[in-house]
Structures are given as C-alpha cells and as structure tokens.
Amino acid sequence: MGRVYLDYNATAPLRPEAREAMLRAMDVVGNPSSVHGEGRAAKAIVERARAQVANAVGCKPQEVVFTSGATEAARVLSVRSIVGSVVVQNTAHDALWSYAAFTPETEQQPDSGNVFAMGLANSETGVISDLPVRVEGQFCDDDYRADLLLIDITQAIGRVPFSFAWSGADFAVCSAHKLGGPKGVGALVVKEGLDVSSLASGGGQEMGRRSGTENVVGIAGFGAAIDAAMRDLADGKWQQVEKLRNILESSIEESAKETIFVGKSEKRLPNTSCLAVPGWKGETQVMQMDLAGFAISAGSACSSGKVRESRVLRAMGYDTEIARSAIRVSLGPETTEDEIYRFAKTWLKQLDKHRARAA
C-alpha cells in the first residue's frame, strides 16, 4: 500500500486547478508592469487572482497585496512597531511571535498605538480563537490594549467561514500552499484607508506596498486554489473531513484511554487532531509513523527537526512532558476512511511497543 499523507496543516497537495492555472500562466511572457499587450496579459492574470483572493477572504481587491507568503506579509508588524509595541497572542505562529514586544502574560501593559497580532486558527491544535471586539476605538482585554488588529488566517481560510470585512481586523495574512496552492506565494490584506511602508523597496509594484516583479505563475495558482477551496467549503467537504477526524479520535480513544486530545472540547478546525500520550515523545512518533508510511508532524512545520517542547501547548497550560509528547494529524478532502483506520491501527501498534519498552 502507498504512503498516507496526513500533514495538511504543513502544506496541502497542489490542487489540479492550481496546476492548470500555473501552466497557462507560464506561457504568458509579459511583465505585469509593462504597458504593451504581453504585459497587459500578465497583469490580467495577477488582477484576476487578486479578485479571487478578495472574494474568498471577504475584502476588496485593492486591499490585497501579494507577497512571498504569510511570513513576509507579517512584516507589516515590524513596520507598525515603529509607532508602538506589538502584542502577540501567546499561541500565535512563530511568523507573528517573532515580532512580539509584549505577550498577554506580561505584567506590564503595552503602550497605546500598537498592534495586537493573533491567529484565527492554531496550526498545531486547530483551536479557533474568538476575535477581539473594538471598544471606543481600541481592542481591549485585561492584558492588552491595541489600536490595530492583525489576524493570521492561514489555517482557517477555505476551511471555516471567514470575512475580513466583518472581522473588524485592520490586517490579515495568508499563504497559498496551505489550501492547495503553490509554495512561495501569499497575501497581506490591508484595510482600505490604512497605509503601510513598503514591505520591499524598489519599483513600487503592488500599489507601492511590495516592490519587485510579481510572481505571476505563483499568483495564478494561488487564485485558482483559493477559488477551489471555497467551492469545497460551500459543498460541505470539510464536514466530511470532520467526520473522519472524529472517527480517528474515537478509534484511538477506545484502545488508548491515556491519550490526551488537545482542544477537543473547544472550537477546532474540522481537520486537525493534536494528541499526546505522556512520555512518548512526539518526534519519536513522527519517525516511527514515517517508517510505517504515514506523514504527520510534531507541531508546526516551521519547528520540524528541532527537539523542543511545544510553546503553544505550554501556553495552554500543559506541562513539559505533554508538550514534548504531542503530535499533529491533519486531514484534507482527499483523505479516505480507509486511510484513517489504517493510521489508527498502526499508531496503536506503535503505542503497544512504547508501553512494552516503558514497562
């Protein structure tokens, strides 16, 4: 039997629609900044994709700035931090965390005139966060006050309903490869009326916000992929994925009562299961399951290869042993029920071996 891919939160397989759009774009020779016919043809591809992303995210096309990914898009935090501190949700992805000046646990209140950055859906646990509410012009909490809100929607878009327009956010960041687009392309959404310094100086492309010739091929794939992802969401495909995720957890829970399912009682992405058996290291499980033909992870893909406890789980109140024992299994629309049962059966066999070694 072939390998089983269960690491969609790290990257999703390239969608056929994205591949086809990229192949077509490869035949367009023009630079989107050129005014001749070939340039206008390339520009049309970029603008079509901009409209597709805007439609999916729930914003205006002119609010979409194409970047190399969500990490580059998050550089808006470093731009804004010039006028104030950046406060970052304690479970946010490292792409946001790297800009933190304060965290919600910090005793010192952040200055006014700052940004609060958060993830809508956590990449490791799938837990969906409530959006803060603006009160008298500020996003307020017992632990922070912020004038501006940035949301990382990378894991959520195309999997759960979202609209930038009703979110109250000032900025949003996302990446194409999480929803079946190509790697190396993403977007920053900037609320109309706000201005940011250029993320990259140069020729003034992307409305002066991100210079450099646009990645026309990647952008074409991004637009086609996000279109297809929204169709899947509308067609209820992620509800079917959620059923498979629940089958997986039930199958494991029946035979392994000691298993902890992180965030099971909270709102979660329909495809994500973060589970831990105390004392059984996550990286060990990943290697064992890889050898058995299953691709999973021990947390965010950005931290793969680094033996460390999960910062996210520690922030959620779990101890070090559990934080080092967690794995993430993330499904997609192509995942089958047979693959889920095969995974559960194989994982439980590996758990039996772990129990025997620990005895």
Image: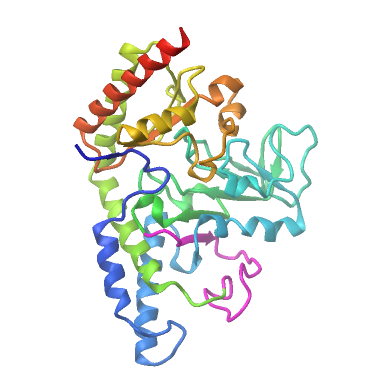
Q: Is residue 71 above or below residue 110?
A: below
The answer to whether one can see residue 318 in this image is no
- Determine the main secondary structure of the stretch shown in magenta: loop
Q: Is residue 61 left or right of residue 83?
A: left
At 42% from the left and 55% from the top, the residue drawn is 57
Residue 288, x across and y down, in percent? 38, 29
On the rendered structure, is 76 left or right of 345? right
Query: On the rendered image, what quadrant is the N terminus found in?
Result: top left
When the figure is inspected, residue 326 is found, relative to residue 71, above or below; the finding is above
Q: As drawn, which residue projects farthest toward the front?
A: 357
The image shows residue 74 at horizontal and vertical percentages of 59, 55
Q: Is residue 24 in sight in this rendering? A: yes
The magenta stretch spans which residues? Answer: 182-210
Give the residue displayed 51% in from the left and 17% down from the top: 279
Nearer to the camera, 334 or 130: 334
Front one among 25 and 109: 25
Q: Measuring 35% from the left and 49% from the top, which residue is drawn there?
A: 12
